[in-house]
Amino acid sequence: MSRSSTAKYDNSAVISVVEVFLYLQLLDFMTTVIGLRIGVQEFSPFIRLLMRWDPIVGVSISKLIAGLLGGICLWQRKIRVIKWINYGFAALVAWNLFIILKFLNM
């Protein structure tokens, strides 16, 4: 079982999944920073812990950790895991946008 999880993915499909992952990480970073700048509080206890000293540094560290975990999944040829992570981050970005818009319309 050497290539079981990537056997059904060609290189262009893998590249697309990785591109979506990277774009979603960037969007999550940007929407989180915008939310923090307008006064929204971070919901995740882990991210709040990282933000103890500086919010931007904390969010940046969380994105580095996400990138490292995504890289490990890619290295282990767990493309399906990255696809599921993408769904979660897409929902998170949508949630961030919803909270920002709700906060701005108060």
Image (spheres, rainbow, N blue to C red):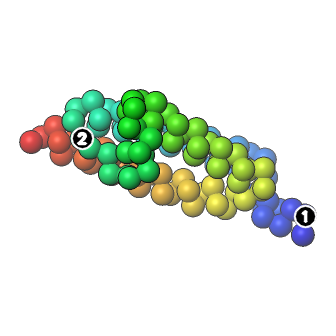
Residue located farthest toward the front when viewing the structure as drawn: 53
Would you say 25 lies left or right of 33 here?
Answer: right
Location of mark 1 (residue): 2
Q: x and y percent of residue 58 in the render?
A: 45, 36
Q: What residue is rendered at 38% in x and 52% in y?
A: 44
Q: What is the count of numbered marks?
A: 2
Neighbour tally class for label 1: few under 14, some 14-19, many 20 plus, Cα within 10 Å: few
**Residue 40, quarter of the rendered image:** top left
Would you say 105 lies left or right of 18 here?
Answer: left
The residues tagged by marks 1 and 2 sit, at their Cα atoms, a distance apart of 46 Å
Would you say 65 lies left or right of 87 here?
Answer: right
Which secondary structure, mark 1? loop
Is mark 1 in CB contact (under 8 Å) with mark 2?
A: no
Q: What residue is rendered at 63% in x and 55% in y?
A: 82
Which disc number belongs to residue 40?
Answer: 2
Q: x and y percent of residue 64 in the render?
A: 58, 38
Q: Tag 2 or tag 1, which sits nearer the N-term?
A: 1
Asked if residue 32 can be seen in this view, the reply is yes
Q: Amino acid at mark 2?
A: Val
Q: What residue is rendered at 78% in x and 64% in y?
A: 5
Residue located farthest toward the left when viewing the structure as drawn: 106
Q: Amino acid at mark 1?
A: Ser
Asked if residue 22 can be seen in this view, the reply is no
84 versus 52 height, above or below? below
9 versus 40 height, above or below? below
